[in-house]
Image (tube, rainbow, N blue to C red):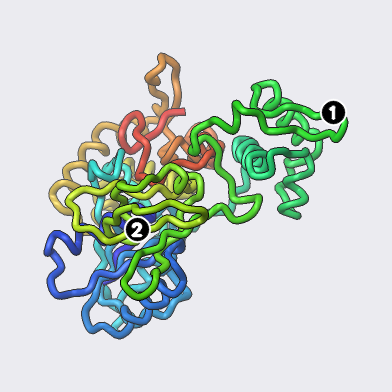
């Protein structure tokens, strides 16, 4: 069985709990995602191909392109965010007969942070609906000014200075909106906020103590050189490279912490240079490692599909190739009753928590790429916040399974 989860922290937790719970007895539980050491991943791929019975927990790294042999069943721990994603995951199913078992779970696990199983349920139904209609997501390149700010701050932290043309020099090709006047306006704004200080002679903006002393999660970026720290397992013969974690997170670790690394609780014994040394530990509790990742935007087609699921006739909903358990059946019925009629009548506005008014978008984390009912379903909006967040499922919202903007 191949079990897909949407984040690396979820994969670590699932692998650990499956092994510890005894639910999977005498069957190896394997783990696969991009931050794991390459030799580790290759060993997992080979073992999964060869074992007659095994469970592999993975992110999108095993959606395609890796030979893992035949898979009898596919399970999804939370709904993927795109139609392409669910099609690729379904395609991993039994290729011998062309008929495979597929399971979808809408988790609510306190240890994994804020979860919204209703969001997963509606997104699963929407993804199946969109896949059946062959409605794939359309590439969308919004102007993410918040991402631009974060990348410039990341460069400033890395090199202790930044210039307006630093981003274009590092990247080579940037979005059309990233032009000289915009870059200068951003660094000037950061200087006004006290995060940078302009050095006129060299025309550079220097990082200030106010920026340097911010917590590690304040700034993210994928530019400016490698920012990863290797977690190394201590073994009798030789050290074992396990996984790479963000350097800013590694700096917050200290000996004595028990952290889930590579699907197992590990005791941090030493933090030195670019390495975190750990040893295996039997533990009932362990904190999740923090892998910084951008919130996943919900494509406009999927957001519009959620609206269709809420408003379509009962006979059309029953016709979707999905079997629901009792919780999913009752939850879907409740949301169709509460929102379906309202949306069907075109009443898409709602009073927000802060007293303002907004409209339902079903755009996922922060209201990204929402299918705007007032705009003919074309979909607009910038991904909420634009900064990386710790990898945990959904971020709460009003009301569940919907967003107000």
Residue 200 bears which disc, if any?
1
Label 1 neighbour load within 10 Å: few <14, some 14-19, many 20+: few
Q: Position of residue 247 (x, y in %)?
A: 50, 49
- In the displayed structure, would residue 381 be above or below residue 39? above
- In the displayed structure, would residue 205 be above or below residue 265? above
Asked whether, in this view, residue 252 is left or right of residue 79, the answer is right
Residue furthest right as drawn: 201
Q: Position of residue 321 (x, y in %)?
A: 27, 62
Q: Earlier in the sequence, mark 2 or mark 1?
A: 1
Residue 190 bears which disc, if any?
none
- In the displayed structure, would residue 376 be above or below residue 89? above
Q: Residue at x 37, y 30 (%)?
A: 345
Q: Residue at x 55, y 38 (%)?
A: 219
Asked whether, in this view, residue 253 is left or right of residue 379, the answer is left
Q: Is 217 in front, or is 14?
A: 217
Query: Circle 2 sits on which residue?
Result: 278
């Amino acid at each position: 069985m191949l079990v897909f989860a949407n984040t690396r922290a979820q994969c670590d937790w699932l692998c650990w709990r499956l092994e510890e719970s005894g639910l999977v007895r005498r069957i190896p539980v394997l783990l696969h995602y991009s931050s794991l050491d390459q030799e580790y991943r290759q060993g997992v791929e080979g073992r999964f191909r060869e074992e007659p019975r095994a469970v592999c927990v993975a992110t999108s790294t095993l959606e395609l392109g890796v030979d893992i042999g035949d898979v009898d069943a596919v399970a999804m721990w939370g709904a993927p965010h795109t139609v392409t994603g669910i099609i690729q995951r379904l395609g991993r199913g039994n290729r011998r007969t062309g008929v495979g078992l597929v399971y979808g779970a809408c988790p609510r696990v306190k240890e994994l942070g804020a979860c919204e199983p209703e969001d997963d349920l509606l997104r699963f139904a929407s993804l199946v609906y969109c896949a059946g209609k062959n409605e794939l997501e359309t590439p969308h390149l919004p102007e993410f000014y918040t991402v631009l700010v974060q990348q410039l701050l990341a460069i400033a932290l890395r090199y202790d200075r930044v210039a307006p043309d630093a981003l274009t020099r590092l990247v080579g090709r940037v979005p059309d909106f990233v032009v000289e006047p915009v870059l200068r306006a951003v660094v000037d704004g950061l200087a006004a906020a006290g995060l940078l200080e302009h050095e006129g002679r060299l025309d550079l903006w220097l990082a200030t103590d106010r920026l340097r002393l911010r917590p590690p999660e304040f700034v993210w970026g994928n530019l400016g050189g490698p920012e990863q720290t290797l977690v190394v397992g201590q073994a009798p013969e030789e050290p074992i490279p396990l996984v790479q974690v963000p350097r800013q997170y590694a700096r917050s670790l200290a000996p004595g912490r028990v952290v889930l690394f590579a699907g197992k609780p590990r005791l941090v014994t030493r933090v030195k240079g670019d390495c975190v040394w750990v040893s295996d530990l039997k533990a009932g509790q362990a904190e999740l490692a923090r892998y910084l990742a951008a919130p996943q935007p919900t494509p406009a087609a999927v957001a519009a599909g959620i609206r269709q699921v809420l408003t379509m006739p009962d006979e059309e909903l029953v016709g979707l190739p999905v079997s629901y358990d009792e919780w999913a059946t009752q939850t879907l019925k409740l949301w169709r009753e509460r929102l379906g009629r309202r949306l069907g009548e075109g009443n898409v506005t709602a009073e927000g928590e802060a007293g303002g008014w907004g409209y339902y978008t079903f755009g996922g984390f922060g209201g990204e790429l929402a299918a705007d009912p007032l705009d003919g379903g074309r979909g607009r909006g910038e991904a909420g916040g634009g900064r990386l967040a710790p990898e945990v499922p959904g971020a709460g919202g009003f009301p569940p399974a919907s967003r107000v903007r």
